[in-house]
Amino acid sequence: MLLLSVNVQAAEDGAAATPPETPPPYADDAAPPASENSSDSTAAGTSSSSDADTQGILGKPGFSFSFGGFVRQETAISTSGDDNPYNQQGWLYNGRETKRFYVLTDANGGPVPINDTTTRAGPQQDGSVNLAILRTRLEADIKFTSNLSLQAKMSGIFDPALYNEYDPHEFNSMAVGKLYGKPNYFRFEAEGKNHPNPLEWSGREYLITFPALFIDYNRGPLDVRIGNQQIAWGQAIFFRVLDVPDGLDLRRHSVLDFASEEFSDKRVPALAVRASYQFADNWLADAYVQKFQPTVYGNPNTAYNVIPSAFTVHDRYGDFDNKISYGLRLKGDIGDVGVQAIAVRRYNPDGVFRWTKSGVNRDLPGLVGSGQVLQDTAFEVDPTGIWSAEEWFTYAGMARLNGVTGLNAAINEFPAAALLGAVPVATPDGPQSGFAAASATLDTFFALAGGAAVGENNAGLRGHIAREYRAENNFGGGLSYVINSTPGSLLDQLIVNFEALYTPNRVFTNPSLSRDFLTESELTTALVMEKYQRFSTEIPATYMVAQWLHKTASDLFGRSLKGQGGTATTAAPGVKGGYDAVVFALQQPFAQLVWRADLSVLYDTQGGILVQPAVRWKPSGSWTVDMFYNYINGHLSSPNENSLSTFDFADELSLRVGYQF
């Protein structure tokens, strides 16, 4: 199972990267001015809302109303021809003959070693369309007085499901859970909560949400916002270091959107009160209190889901929806150096995962009454589960889990497993020493789940896991400096930013999926250098940025480094030395700003790379066409030791055509 916490920039409608200047209150997440570098709130990339001064009608001086929006078609076409391997549609073992070794008992109670093969039932077709949705955004700004206004954004998405969809009935699946039948593209399923995200309405093919709906009161240096809102902090452009208030919505296009855009369309909005005060000496104090809202992952059997669909996830957000997060930021200048500091108390929106009881009373074939015992373990008999030990270890590695300790945790923490004859394997010299014994134990139970006791072979075991949330403290700071050098040189006006975040006793998912979560303090740092450089008088300046990220305990997506490196033949040994990634990006507008070229490159030093060339065409003030290509290679070294191999399947060409009104 993959535990995904996005740190790479990948939003759909945020502002393109711009040099950080000393901002007014909320400048980090306010709409940018109309230019070739702004795309927030409009498909075309410029502001189009029209102000209507109604003073003469309503007789209220200062009253004004503005309204605008866009409609956009977004399509992503796979160039690899591969389906997502974390879903039933692209599962690596569908139709693939796999060897097994297991032991059954004869009529006299003696052991009978068996070598056989199994072939997992499932779809065997490649997809071509990863994404095909229609999006719209409506925005309104109502100014009641010079101090009081209402800001509202409503987003709508329709997905006509033009894909080769998984059909569970075709393979006799009876998997329990609302999300494990026909794919549901937008529903956020949290047990005990019918409406997990306030101001959001969703179904299988549609999503309606309010990213912003708040009252804004501004009087001199004081600014207060009350309502549903997104909060963006920090200066790092491609990595989230100080940007900790909000989780991310990873439905739709996950982390594979236009990389030169900000996170404004990915941050999960929350009901909050936010206040800032601008001091006369150019210092800003910014504080918030918000209702806790979690990161939303892609649903099983949708194009970009990354939690293997052989797991059933029980999201326990209903037990945490009354929690609050809060934080304070100070930002200002000391001489020529910009400084900022944050302190945040939050529930980590990415969550942590562990084994949980399945609650499914379904017998092992030929073993009447075994379902009453099995329901108190972490497993359910179903053909959409795992069928062999090789498959178990392959997907454990892909999900950054440890297949040996994962087996032991599923046995030790559920006493009912012993009633089925399950015994934890010994690992005297570490998990690798228990690999062979774990493989034999796993193959035995997968064979029984498939019906080996009655001469059948048509099912496997699904694992059930719970998602929970843990509180943490975040302390961070940042420095920025503008270098002055020879005019026109590469160093002149180069902006250097450094950010660091320290999280003591951060809670991570244990690679064994044990309820005994990992606890480890983590330091995250980022160095960012950016500038505009004019190479020719014939075209506008080129924007360039280079960045380096280092994390001491987790990877780019927040997964513990202790779960890295597993394969079909080895349990995860973990990775030492921390995690490092570097980014280079540039953006080149051309004359009259009709065309713009972008290039973004992310290199994971453990052996993965993402390259995204892009071009934007703006033939008029109302139309914008974006085309970009994602090339992802996560096999430059061991694939399960780098982050980008998670999306290795997603080489694709994306096209966005938008009309602004």
Image (tube, rainbow, N blue to C red):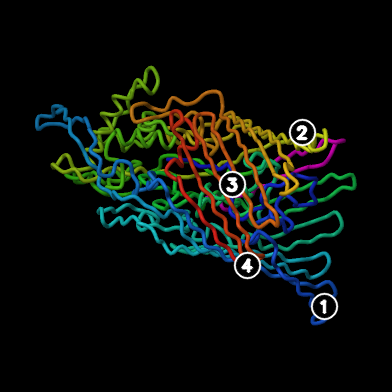
The front one of 269 and 588 is: 588
Q: Of the residues shown, which amino acid type is indicated by label 4?
A: Leu
Q: Which residue is mark 1?
A: 55
Which of pointers 4 and 1 lies earlier in the amino acid sequence?
1
Q: Which residue is mark 2?
A: 491
The magenta stretch spans residue 329: yes
Q: Are marks 4 and 2 in contact (CB under 8 Å)?
A: no
Which of pointers 4 and 3 lies earlier in the amino acid sequence?
4
User: Disc 4 and disc 1: Cα gap in Å?
Assistant: 24 Å
Residue 288: image location, x then y, percent: 72, 50
Q: Which of the two discs, 4 and 3, sits closer to the camera? A: 3
| For residue 293, side relative to residue 646 (left or right) | right
> Magenta residues?
319-343
Which of pointers 1 and 3 lies earlier in the amino acid sequence?
1
Q: Of the residues shown, which amino acid type is indicated by label 1?
A: Gln
Please tell me which residue is depicted at 73% across the width and 49% down the height of the picture: 538
Residue 55 position (above or below residue 69) = below
User: Disc 2 and disc 3: Cα gap in Å?
Assistant: 25 Å
Residue 306: image location, x then y, percent: 44, 45
Q: Which of the two discs, 2 and 3, sits closer to the camera? A: 2
Which of pointers 4 and 2 lies earlier in the amino acid sequence?
4
Residue 259 numbered mark, or none: 3
Please tell me which residue is depicted at 37% across the width and 54% down the height of the picture: 180
Q: Which of the two discs, 1 and 2, sits closer to the camera? A: 2
Q: Which residue is mark 4?
A: 138
Q: Are marks 4 and 1 in contact (CB under 8 Å)?
A: no
The magenta stretch spans residue 501: no
Indicate the quadrant containing the C terminus: top left, top right, bottom left or bottom right: bottom right
Helix, strand or loop for disc 1: helix
